[in-house]
């Protein structure tokens, strides 16, 4: 969870799968054939989040990071990232002194050389630089004509100890158009000439780089791949699992899209034929139908002109109709309606709609979700723009990060989790609602393990799971019976769904004890929820959801120990309870009750106290959801 995320389950989010980023880095490194990989995280990592993406890329083997602005590089330093970072787009207002103090490598184009040298003198820190050649793109970089004079000035500065030339680079203009390979080759030959001039003048650059994502991917089909691969590749779009080619998909290159843009349906209503949709009535319904309102619009970064772009709701895909507004767009449920994995359509006019308020709506993602390319085509633009323009108003949610930071924002693959999601419900009601959303993804045979101190909210969470599964009301803690079965309610929201088996494994010492309560008899036909089950129930299934609930703060914190009597004292306040005997009487117990007189009474009193707190407390919680095993290969959408 980051500062860009809300403290409750999100209404809309851009879910960034950092394991996909890592996979893409590794795949691109394979295609680079041993060259160093510079991971470009400019523009907030193309809208994906610079710091999480940078960490994931480095963990996967990237050697260096690339940004446009020095301020972007400094922000990475502020986040604790120490890997080499190169920034190449400057203005007279660029703080070169700060960049040098923070060990930021600088791309030099010519005009800024004097300002960088002044910063080196002021800080006493020689600049590490990459010299940029304008080999024909017409943007930054010294032109072929300016290059010899530029090199003379750089050599003088290096001899004066004010800078060190680490690299020389250029940027390719038409590498995403393979039919124009001759123009790309001409740029690459210009780079070769520039490097020769620099070396003849006494410079010794070790990193020559030209290949962007299309350059790297296209190199595989070139007669001389080494001409473009050089010493390093500088990749951006490919990190995020997108293809720069109009006729080739990410999957063609073994890449995985990292971002899923999703929300929940905000309204569904029946309308007659001829009903207008959105501003200007640019669209009117052809017949009686249902309209679904999607609460994402151009203020969220959805292109206003992308009418006709696809939205997946359930297992069907519908086109956006009418003009996209600032905060919302609309789909007509009688149009398209093609299953995500099929080309056949279905006409929902005059029928009960297959879409309900609260259903998840995915604008783009991976696999069966609509693609970024489809949205780019609808908007008349490119993949790069679609993901980069997603507004900060849309929370970024990160799954399967390589470096857990202690706040639950990222999952650590070291413990075997496939992915991790973190939410921060502020109230007991929000905790139950979050659990209901988890329940939407559960089916018979699923194992859910709940961890958390007494009073954390495990019973509250299980009540939400039960409500979402459609079992009968009355879920309470199973502390004294070990296991309770809550049957499906045939009149509830999921008639015919699985029963819920609720287990408290605290008093069970081992997996063998679990076997004694015969969970194997029900695990395949029910959803099994186990509290205190770590190292006791994992053998029941090859997949599981593990949910940790942490009380962030409050007026009365539960014990830190797993022992339910830890920190509990007898009525006279003298010493902890001895579970082997009785406790002293007198005084008053929790909530003014009579003092407990036996170990069982102590546990019951504690359970009643914290269960009551579960029902009433509105202290914030942190809920961390982790998926393990093949059943949970992909993160749930909450």
Image: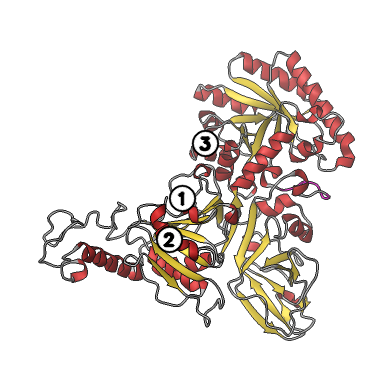
Q: Residues within 10 Å of mark 1 (few under 14, many from 20)?
A: many
Residue 95 lies left or right of residue 182; in this view the side is left
**Label annotation for residue 408:** 1
Q: Which residue is mark 2?
A: 530
Question: What SS does tag 2 mark?
Answer: strand
Q: Is residue 375 left or right of residue 600?
A: right
Q: How far is the residue under mark 2 from the one under mark 3?
A: 39 Å
- Residue 199 pos. (x, y %): 74, 16
> From where the camera sits, is residue 133 visible?
yes
Q: Which mark is residue 81?
A: 3
Classify residue 236 by image quadrant. top right
Q: Hey, which quadrant is residue 597 in on the image?
A: bottom left
- What residue lies at 70% left-to-right and 80% top-to-bottom? 290
**Dot in front, 3 or 1:** 1
Look at the image and tell me whether residue 132 can be seen: no
Could you tell me residue 338's position as x and y percent?
A: 76, 69
Vertical order, 328 against 388 (above or below) = below
Vertical placement of residue 461 versus 60, above or below? below
Q: Nearer the viewer, mark 2 or mark 3?
A: 2
**Mark carried by residue 86:** none
Contact? badges 2 and 3 (CB < 8 Å): no
Left or right side of 506 for 543? right
The range drawn in magenta is 242-247
Query: Magenta segment, principal secondary structure?
Result: loop
Q: Position of residue 75 (x, y in %)?
A: 53, 40
Neighbor class of circle 2 (other Cα within 10 Å; few <14, some 14-19, many 20+) is many
245 falls in the magenta region: yes
Q: Are marks 1 and 2 in contact (CB under 8 Å)?
A: no
For disc 3, the neighbor class at 10 Å (few under 14, some 14 to 19, many from 20) is some
Report the residue at 58% width, 19% height from top.
162
Taking the magenta stretch, the answer to whether it contains residue 276 is no
* Front one among 603 and 169: 603
């Amino acid at each position: 969870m980051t500062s860009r995320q809300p403290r409750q389950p999100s209404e809309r989010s851009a879910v960034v799968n950092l394991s996909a980023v890592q996979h893409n880095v590794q795949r691109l490194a394979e295609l680079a054939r041993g060259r160093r990989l510079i991971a470009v995280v400019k523009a907030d990592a193309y809208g994906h989040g610079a710091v999480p993406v940078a960490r994931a890329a480095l963990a996967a083997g990237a050697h260096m990071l690339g940004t446009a602005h020095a301020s972007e590089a400094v922000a990475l330093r502020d986040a604790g990232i120490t890997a080499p970072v190169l920034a190449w787009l400057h203005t007279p207002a660029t703080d070169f002194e700060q960049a040098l103090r923070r060990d930021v490598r600088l791309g030099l184009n010519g005009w800024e050389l004097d300002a960088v040298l002044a910063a080196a003198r002021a800080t006493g820190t020689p600049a590490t630089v990459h010299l940029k050649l304008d080999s024909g793109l017409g943007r930054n970089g010294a032109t072929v004509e300016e290059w010899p004079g530029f090199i003379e000035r750089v050599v003088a500065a290096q001899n004066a100890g004010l800078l060190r030339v680490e690299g020389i680079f250029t940027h390719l203009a038409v590498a995403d158009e393979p039919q124009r390979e001759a123009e790309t080759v001409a740029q690459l030959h210009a780079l070769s000439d520039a490097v020769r001039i620099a070396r003849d003048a006494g410079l010794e650059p070790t990193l020559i780089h030209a290949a962007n994502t299309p350059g790297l991917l296209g190199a595989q089909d070139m007669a001389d791949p080494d001409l473009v691969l050089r010493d390093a590749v500088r990749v951006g779009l490919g990190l995020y699992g997108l293809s720069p080619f109009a006729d080739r998909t990410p999957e063609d290159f073994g890449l995985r899209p990292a971002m899923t843009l999703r929300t929940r349906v905000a309204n569904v209503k029946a309308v007659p034929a001829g009903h207008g949709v959105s501003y200007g009535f640019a669209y009117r319904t052809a017949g009686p139908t249902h309209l679904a309102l999607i609460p994402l619009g151009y203020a969220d970064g959805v292109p206003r002109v992308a009418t006709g772009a696809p939205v997946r709701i359930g297992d069907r895909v519908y086109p956006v109709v009418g003009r996209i507004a600032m905060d919302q767009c609309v789909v007509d449920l009688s149009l398209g309606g093609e299953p995500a994995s099929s080309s056949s359509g279905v006409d929902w006019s005059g029928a009960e709609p297959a879409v309900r308020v609260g259903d998840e709506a995915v604008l783009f993602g991976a696999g069966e979700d609509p693609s970024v390319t489809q949205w780019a085509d609808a908007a008349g633009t490119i993949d790069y723009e679609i993901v980069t323009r997603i507004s900060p108003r849309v929370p970024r949610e990160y799954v399967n990060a390589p470096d857990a930071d202690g706040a639950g924002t990222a999952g650590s693959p070291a413990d075997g989790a496939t992915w991790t999601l973190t939410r921060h419900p502020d109230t007991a009601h929000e905790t139950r609602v979050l659990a209901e959303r988890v329940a939407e993804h559960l089916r018979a045979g699923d194992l859910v393990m709940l961890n958390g101190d007494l009073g954390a909210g495990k019973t509250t969470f299980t009540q939400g799971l039960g409500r979402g599964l459609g079992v009968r009301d009355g879920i309470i803690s199973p502390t004294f019976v070990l296991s309770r079965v809550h049957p499906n309610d045939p009149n509830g929201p999921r008639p015919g769904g699985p029963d819920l088996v609720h287990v408290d494994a605290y008093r069970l010492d081992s997996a063998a004890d679990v076997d004694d309560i015969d969970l194997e008899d029900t695990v395949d036909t029910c959803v099994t929820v186990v509290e205190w089950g770590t190292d006791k129930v994992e053998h029941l299934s090859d997949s599981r959801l593990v949910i940790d609930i942490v009380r962030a703060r409050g007026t009365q914190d539960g014990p830190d120990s797993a022992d339910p009597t830890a920190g509990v004292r007898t009525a006279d306040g003298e010493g902890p309870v001895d579970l082997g005997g009785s406790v002293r009487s007198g005084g008053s117990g929790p909530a003014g009750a009579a003092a407990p007189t036996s170990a069982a009474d102590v546990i019951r009193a504690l359970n009643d106290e914290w269960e009551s707190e579960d029902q009433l407390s509105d202290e914030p919680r942190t809920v961390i959801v982790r998926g393990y095993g093949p059943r949970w290969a992909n993160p749930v959408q909450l």
